Image (spheres, rainbow, N blue to C red):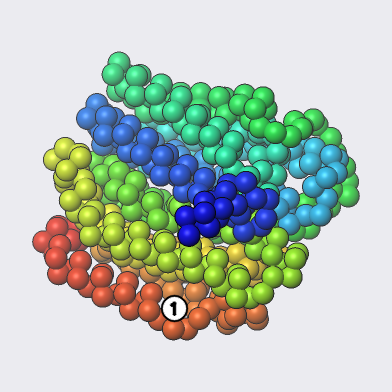
Amino acid sequence: MEISRTSKLKSIFHSDSTKARAMRGSLWTIFGHVTSQGLRLLSNLILTRLLFPEIFGVMAIAQVILQGLVMVSDLGLVPSIVRSKNVSDSRFLNTAWTLQFIRNCLLWMITLAISFPIATFYERSELVYLIPLAALALLVSGLFPIKVILASRSMNLFRVTSIQLAGQVIGTSVSVILAFYYKNALIFVIGALLAELSRLFLYRCYLKGANNSFEWHKPSVHELFTFGKWIFVSSTFGFVVQHANVFILGKLLAAHTFGIYTVALVLAMLPITVCHMLNGKVLLPLFSEMSRNGASVHDIQKGRYIVLAGGTLVTLFLMFISPYFFPLLYDDRYSLAGYISLLVLMASLPELLLIVTLNKLMVDGRSKTFALLTLFRGSLLVILGITLATSYGIVGVCIASLISGLTTYILALKVKGMGVLVKPTYEALIFIVFFVVSVGCIFLYSEGLTKVTLLT
């Protein structure tokens, strides 16, 4: 028995089979994210004692603006390369790298034009310089070699994960050191820029594979844009889905309260972030390879439910501990962050379901259908979010997220070929457990949740 277990472990860490690579990729992705969140938490514990909550709020707005620009200009390079048959063609890879860099240069120039209007809208003058300076990191990431994507395609993630963590350690350390001397959001900008510069150096020097050069190959451009044009639409509204809460509440809430809200998201977004990473780095490449090799629906279902079950269990656990987490580790100014985190977690089940469901559309090449579903969800979320948040604040945004997510999930299962992913019994069990735990948390933490409802 012991010999059998040892041989299985050796197989996981040394075999080149699809299953072994998927398991290794999952382990490295989870390890990387847990370590990353641990570093982020440690830095937050230090920085929240050195800086005012308002600084976290204004930096959250700047970061969301940059993430928005990246997503609304998404050319679909990652899924295009993951599913392409031309990854051995250097012209294809060099063209993808050239497009990546050109796009990021254009994004930085856009930040110069939009920073003043955004600063005026949110009535925070520091955004005029924070946004363009923070966008310098985009210029650096535009130079990341395509071999980073190829490593994800083959699910060989050890070096990629190590380099990502090394960059975070460098950037976080610099930000924390600077925070002792400067009480300004610029410390985050400097830390992020140094993190990206470190990653660029390490990717080029230590990641296996060829570095890229500028090249323009028309057939490759055509292939990338044919698939990527609908990714552009889905990414635009995917950004709306992910960050509508920040845009809406950043305008409606007081700066101090909004800063507390952004700190609460550190814990609340953990399960969703892990699922997104597993989906992008493991599930999507895995399902793509399975599709090319003619794998059964049962195998795809199994992979889907492993990730979904893990994300659900982590979410339920965090729902119980979040009201105790922030008072234990943060000072009294962040006492309500635990209850805010609980509300966000209670509304997160539809997002978990959609992450592990819509990837089938990408594998099948149905990027148009994926884009239309994302467009529908984003539009509904914005309409409901603005309407409900005006009267109910944070609670209203959470309700809007829940309704728009469930509606989109139901529509997704109606799409041809999507129903085969779902086992009704398993799906019903997940919904029932999530509902029961949510009701229990409402009764347990009703006093704190009531205080959150007053933050309008």
Residue 393 visible, this angle: no
In percent of width and height, residue 167 lies at 50, 29
* Residue at the image point whose x is 41% and y is 21% from the top: 174
Residue at x-position 58% and y-position 81%: 419
Q: Is residue 117 left or right of residue 360?
A: left
Q: Could you tell me residue 97's position as x and y percent?
A: 74, 38
Element assignment for label 1: helix
Would you identify the image quadrant in which residue 227 lies? Answer: bottom right
| Residue 259 shown left or right of residue 323 in the figure | right
- Residue labelled with disc 1: 427
Considering depth in this image, is 184 or 248 the residue closer to the camera? 184
Q: Residues within 10 Å of mark 1 (few under 14, many from 20)?
A: few
**Residue 262 percent location from the top left of the image:** 32, 45
**Residue at x 62% of width, y 59% of height:** 19
Q: Is residue 180 above or below residue 398?
A: above
* Image location (x, y in percent) of residue 335: 16, 46
Above-or-below relation of 351 to 100: below
